[in-house]
Image (cartoon, rainbow, N blue to C red):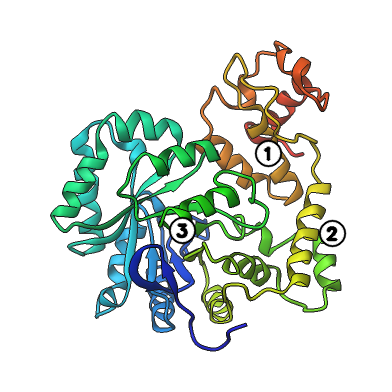
Amino acid sequence: MATGKMQFRNFGRIDWKVSPLGFGCMRLPTLDGKPLSGKIDERESIRMIRHAIDQGVNYIDTAYPYHEGRSEIVLGKALKDGYRERVRVATKSPIWLVKRQKDFDTYLNTQLRRLKTDHIDFYLLHGLSKKRWRETVLKHNLLKRAENAMHDGKIGHLGFSFHDDYAAFKEIVDGYDGWDFCQIQYNYMDIKRQAGTKGLRYAASNGLAVVVMEPLLGGRLANPPPKIRKMFDRHDDKQSPADLALQWIWNQTEVSVILSGMSTMQQVKQNIRSASSSGIGSMDKSELRFVDRLRSRYKEETPISCTKCGYCMPCPNGVDIPGNFELYNDGYIHDDAESSRRTYKRFMGKKQRAGACKQCGKCEKKCPQKLPIMTLMPEVHSVLGEGMPF
C-alpha cells in the first residue's frame, strides 16, 4: 500500500491526474450548528479548503443549492490568492429548476459570478433520473446549450450526477457521446443500489471518469451501530470504519476520485491521511472478506425482508414499494431515521411515497416473500413521512 505523499489517479479519458480525495462543499462548518444551512463559517471553511489544496487535493466539488446557495460563494472566496489555478472546480446545473432553454444559461452565469471565475472545469447536470433526463434534458435540448457553453469557454467538461436505477443510468450514459465523467453514489453497502458496481464498471468501460459521492453513506459507515462496532473491535488491523470504507472504494480501478463532504479540520486531515495511503488493488483478500462480512451483518439487521425482486411492481397507484422499504431499512440498521426522512421527502415524488398506498392488495398477491405490504406501507410512512420513531 502506498504511503506518505498524495497519490494521483487517471480521470477517465481526460489527460489529467486527479487526487483520490475531492473536497465536497455540501457539508461545510456552520455558525448555527445546523448542517447544510446557509450560515457557513466562512473563515473556517476557507482554512479547511486551502489546507486540503496545500496537501495535494486538486478536485473541489459544489453545486447551486448547497448551503442554500452560499457554498459556491464561499468556495469562490477560498480560491482567491492563487488557489484557483491549483485546482479543477466542479459544480452542477440545478436541472429541476430549468423550465425552458435559457434557464440553463441563466443559472450557469450566476454560478460563474458566485465562484468568481470565467470558467467551470467540470460541469454536471445535477441529480439526473430517467424522468429528468427525458422530460427536462432532452425536452429542452440542454445538451446543445451545454455544448454552446463549452464552445464559449464557460465549461471545460460535461458530466452528470445520478440518482435512479441501473437501467436509467445506462440509458443516460448511452444517450450522449459527449459525456466525460459522471458522479454516482457508491460505497460498500450500495453495490447493487442505484448505478451500483455494474454502473461504475459500465461508465468506466465507456471512457468516463467516475466521481464517487456518499462513500460513507452520509457518515453512517463512519459511525456504525454497536453490533457492527464490535466487529471492528475484533478486527486485527484496528482500522477505523471510515478509512476501511474509503480504502474499499479506492481499491477499485474504475474509481477516479471520492468526494468527502468535510465539516471539520480533523476530518480533512484524517481523509488526507487515508488518501495518501490509498491505491488500486491495495487491499488484500482478508480485508475484502471482512468488508463482505460487514455488509452481511448490516443486512441481518434489516427489519423488512424485501429482496427488491420487483414482482410487486408496478404499483397501480405509482408507489415505489421496494424503494420505500429500502429507505426504511437504511434508517433502521444505521440508527439514522433523519437521513432516510430527508431522502423520502426530497427525492421521492408524492405518488411514489408509502403514504400514497391505496391498500388495493395487488402487490401482496405477487410478493414471493409474502410480505404484509398493506400493513407495512402506513408504518413506513409514519416513520419517514410523519417523523414517528421506529
Which quarter of the figure has residue 271? bottom right
Circle 2: element type:
helix
Q: Is residue 178 above or below residue 90?
A: above
Name the one closer to the observer, 259 or 281: 281
Q: Position of residue 160 (x, y in %)?
A: 39, 48
Sequence-earlier tag: 3 or 2: 3
Amino acid bearing label 2? Lys
Residue placed under numbered mark 2 in the picture:
227
Name the one closer to the observer, 102 or 27: 102
Q: Position of residue 382 (x, y in %)?
A: 69, 30
Residue placed under numbered mark 1 in the picture:
326
| Viewer-side label of 3, 2 | 3
Sequence-earlier tag: 3 or 1: 3
Amino acid bearing label 1? Glu
One can see residue 225 in this view: no
Horizontal placement of 123 versus 215: left or right? left
Horizontal placement of 20 versus 381: left or right? left
